Structure formats: structure tokens, C-alpha cells
Image (cartoon, rainbow, N blue to C red):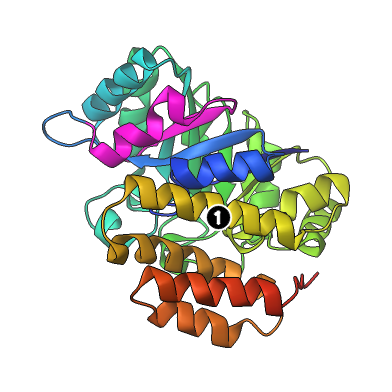
Amino acid sequence: MRFYFAPLEGISGYVYRNAYHKYFGQVDKYFIPFIMPNQFGHLSSREKNDILPEHNEGMYAVPQILTSSAEDFIGTAQKLKTYGYEEVNLNLGCPSKTVVTKGRGSGFLAYPDKLDCFLEEIFRKTDMKISIKTRIGKESPEEFERLLDIYNQYPLEELIIHPRLQTDMYKNTPNWDVFGEALGKCKSQVCYNGDIFTVGDYERFTQKFPEVECVMLGRGILSNPGLVCTIRKGTPLEKETLKAFHDQVYGEYQTVLSGAKTILFKMKEMWFYMGPVFTNYEKYVKKIRKSEKLSVYEDVVERLFVEQEIYINE
């Protein structure tokens, strides 16, 4: 089985990725949170930092592009190629309303004819591998039959399927029936994405779909950074390793970000997912969420690591 790290905007940037790769690794591809081309054709400082080769050393990193403009996609892909990238990923999965209302991400799925024309142009004019991360439709699972017919017309590097609708956001459960049907019809390699948070989740998935050779994890890794190591090697998440991982992320944010408020915002996002990996975590995470000074944050985190133990719900 191959494992991919999903792109999660605002969280899985290069600081997090590098610390994760150092202390946990075991991931075959890291997908960089999306680049959204702007009218000037420039990368934002966040986007540039995320894709710099020196910020992705030792890992296979794939930049993701979020756009419904073929011209913008092609121009961005060409720019990424100058940085040494050989593969780009098209985001057709983001369910955010601000993205969807502009016809991007999973909002693009509502316009299959436009999507078909878009794909025809980018595959004709882009000299790079192109993979797609998609949901199964905007409002109805019946939409995916038409979408899959479109995808099958193009030489995708792979199709990463998150079997939810845009309207589901991250609620309800992934539609394994639609995913199973797609497996039998898709002409390209298929990767699964959606709600694998534990070893038990992974085992249930592989029992249902033993033919699938690739899984993408996002929130599952954020919730338990040791998950892939446990799946692959049977090694449990160790508190000392998690502490070293945390300290590198925190230390690096202090170096590259300015102001306690900005640093704490990033760390609070991280603990939103990671907190439940500890016993009796609630009061500590609540204090982390309320902390306004780095010294207060550091004290709460230190006590959490000293006073509580790792607890993984399988």
C-alpha cells in the first residue's frame, strides 16, 4: 500500500511537513496545499515558501492547483516546472463555499461540459504529469458517472477520489458504493481518500477494497501523526517522538512567523486535531485555545505531556 499526505490549507504547510517527514515519514507523496492563481500570475509568499525545493528536501512533493481557468492552470504549472516539479494536482475536491461559489474546487463539478473543455486544454498544453483529486459530485452521487466518463478521456497520472459530495462538506460518511463502482470503471490508477482515522478504519477499508493500492490521509494524520507508522510497522505512537515533533513545529513557527497571536493561531489549529490523542485532554486543549501568551501556551503543553499518556482509539 502506498500512502499520501493530503493537502490541508493552513495546517500542512512546509513547516509541518518537514517536521512530520523527520519524525514519522512513511509517506510516499506529500501534496502541497493549493495554489490559487491570481490575476497577476504571481505566487503569494505562502505559496512560494511551500513549493521551494529547499523546503521539500527528501520527499516527493506534488503542488496542487485550484482554478477553473485553463490558462491560469497552464501558466502555474509551467512556473512550477521551473522549480523542478514533474507532477501537479488539480483540486476538484475543496468544498468551501467561498471556493465553490466561484466555480472552483468541487464547485467545478457542477459544470461537466466546462470541466471537459478545461481538461482537454490543460492536458494538451501542459508537459507535466497531472493527477486529479475529486469529490463524487456537487449535490448528487449520480453526477459521478458523467464525471468519470470525462476523467477517462484523459491520461491522468492518478485519480484521487474522496467519495463525498460538496454539500456533505465533511459530514455524513464516504459513499463506498460509488467508490466501488468507480474502481471497476476508472481507466487510471485510483487512490482513496476519506475518514481513515485509525488502524481499524484502514483495515475495514482494505478488507472491503483489497485491490486498492493507494490511500490518502489528511485529518487522520493530523489527529494521529503516528498513524501510518502504526499501519506499516505496527509501532505505536510514542510520547517522546510526538513531543520532539511538536517542538520542531513550534520552534520553526517562532522563526518564520511574527507575533505571538499568529504563532498561537497555528498551534491551536494543530491541537484542534491532535488533542484527543492524549488521555484526559479536554482541559488542556481548552487552556491552549484560551492562551494569549507563548509562555502560557508552553506551560500548558509541558504539563499535558508530563501528566497525560497517549491513548489511541482503534
* Percent of width and height locating residue 249: 50, 51
Residue 222 visible within the image: yes
x and y percentages locating residue 111 in the rendered image = 31, 46
Residue shown at the point (56%, 88%) measured from the top left = 283
Magenta stretch encompasses residue 36: no
- Quick one: 214 or 35, which is closer to the camera? 35
Residue 36 visible from this viewpoint: no
Q: Residue at x 59, y 67 (%)?
A: 274
Check the picture and name the quadrant holding the C terminus.
Answer: bottom right
- Residue at x-position 26% and y-position 53%: 258
Q: Nearer the viewer, residue 285 or 2?
A: 285
Q: Percent from the top left, x then y, of residue 41?
A: 17, 28
Residue 269's image quarter?
bottom left
Q: Amino acid at mark 1?
A: Asp
Q: Tell me where residue 253 appears, x and y as whole percent.
A: 40, 51
The quadrant of the image that shows the N terminus is top right
Q: Is residue 225 left or right of residue 210?
A: left
Q: Residues within 10 Å of mark 1 (few under 14, many from 20)?
A: some
Mark 1, secondary structure of its residue: helix
Considering every residue shown, the one lying at the far left of the view is: 40
Tag count in the figure? 1
Nearer to us in this view, 120 or 96? 96
Relative side of 94 to 61, left or right: left
Magenta stretch bounds: 43-68
Disc 1: which residue: 247
